[in-house]
Amino acid sequence: REWGGGRMQSEKSPRELVGGIAGLNLTMSDIASPEKPMLKPVVVAPELSRDSVAMVDVELPSIDLSKVPEDGPETKLSRMVVDVKGWPTSILFEEVSWALHAPELEAHNCKPGMRVIIAKAETHGPKTAPHTLYVMHIKTAFSIRGISRRYSDFKDLDRALRAVKRSAPSLPRKKTFGKMSPKFITERKRQLQVYVDSILADPTCAASEPFKAFLGAHGHAVEIEILARAATHAVVPVEGQVGVPQQWRDVDVAALAGVQAVVEHSRVASNVAREARALNQLAIMQCNFGVKDKALDAVRRAFTCCRQGQEEGGTLACCLTWASIHAAFGEHVLAETRLHEAEGLAKELGDAGAQGLCLRLRSLVRNARGRPREAAESAVGAMALLLEAKDYRTLALTEHGLGATLLAAGEMRQAVEVLESALLFRRKSRDKLGLSETLSALGHTFAQIGYQLHAMDYFSQALALCQEVGDACGESICL
């Protein structure tokens, strides 16, 4: 449409532009004829169910880094405490990463994680009695299925809901004449969408047996669970999220003094294992207070204790924390050195997942130093190791970061491919917060290349997920 109207300016021809974006399903005729819709709708057959997690083909996209520049703008990093091999560990993230939203999720603001969308209305006749069939898509974070219902089915639902709750949402009134006109059908489809949304917003009606039967939800355990939670206002932990130990959310001076006392007591008692854990905790806390020398001294002593006690997981965790402390104070070269050591430790342990994590962190540090080519090379290496280890959550994080690097380099086609791959692995790891982040990133990407409808669809999906997990920050970004 944009090419046809002469409003899109690009050095590439239409054929090159369309051919370079995966999954858009466009032809030259779509661009040459402004009156034709650019995107071909995907129709979900009635009563067809699809689990998007089961459909993931675990295969990495091929990446050409030749056009990624050697030098670029320096990115900013942040830290968050997560669990690594049973040890609290300070891990680096991009400052803009939505993973950092995890400690701030508002459980009391979560909304039901299911949407019912009336996708289209189909008219039938004249061989049968003229009627309209409404095709609906029932979506959860990781699945989608289609059903079709007539107005009479909605009427039966309304009658049954009135028996459950007298103040149930009102169904649009029936029309006798002119009910098959396109204008009326379009308006009726809008009214029915409002009606269904009102039912979902009412916990009693949403969890009622008549509504479950109307949706054909029996046999779909995830949907039944979501509707049951809506009725009880129950909140469950967000799946696939980075673990944030509770004790790291509010660190004060009294807690710091307490940990220092544990360090001294363990040293006197020659309890090396306990001393190592206390020193590791002390290092993270001192870093949070901005005391670099004490933080580095504590993590160095923790590392030595772990070596002495042959605590392999602790040695790796302390090395990663050590790197994050250097990065926190802008010492990126030293941080990369520590990460290289951590990668060597992981290799000695034969732990491909830990190796991949170290390479991912090195990629972040190299981006912080303004070296996007080297960062991208580290990310590609990390992806192969993480796929081997089946650490899909960290793999998706890595792909998301690589997609941002490619996007900044102007490699739109590759950026879309990598972000779509990240989307699949986010689903496979059931990471709802990460899934919303990647959907939002794809929305921004398609908006930049002029595909506004595609972008809006991604943003609306991301917004729904943010509302489901209670991510107010992500919700504001999507809006």
Image (cartoon, rainbow, N blue to C red):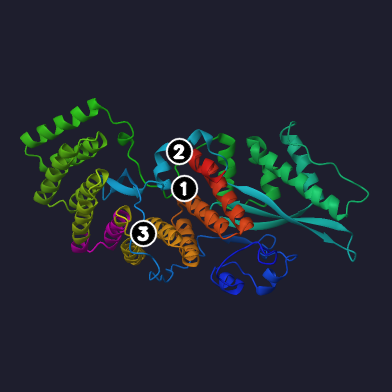
Q: Is residue 157 left or right of residue 455?
A: right
* Residue farthest to the top, as pictured: 254
Q: Quadrant of the C terminus?
A: top right
Q: Find residue 349 and name its label.
A: none
Q: Is residue 321 above or below residue 40?
A: above
Is 255 contained in the magenta span?
A: no
Q: Earlier in the sequence, mark 1 or mark 2?
A: 2
Number of marks in picture: 3
Residue 449 at what x, y percent from top left?
Answer: 56, 60
Q: Which residue is mark 1?
A: 433
Tell me the CA gap for discs 2 and 3: 24 Å
Tag 2: amino acid: Leu
Q: Find residue 105 and name its label.
A: 2
Span highlighted in magenta in the image? 346-365
Mark yes or no: residue 142 visible. no
Contact, mark 1 vs mark 2 (Cβ under 8 Å): yes
Tag 1: amino acid: Leu
Residue neighbourhood size for the residue with mark 3, other residues' Cα within 10 Å, grouped as few (<14), some (14–19), many (≥20): some
Q: Tell which tag, 2 or 3, sits nearer the viewer.
A: 2
Please give the name of the residue rendered at 14% of the width and 48% of the height, measured from the top-left corner. Answer: 303
Q: Quadrant of the N terminus?
A: bottom right
From the viewer's side, name the closer residue of 3 and 84.
3
Q: Earlier in the sequence, mark 1 or mark 3?
A: 3
Tag 3: amino acid: Asp
Q: Secondary structure at mark 1?
A: helix
From the viewer's side, name the closer residue of 80 and 129.
80
**Majority secondary structure in the magenta region:** helix
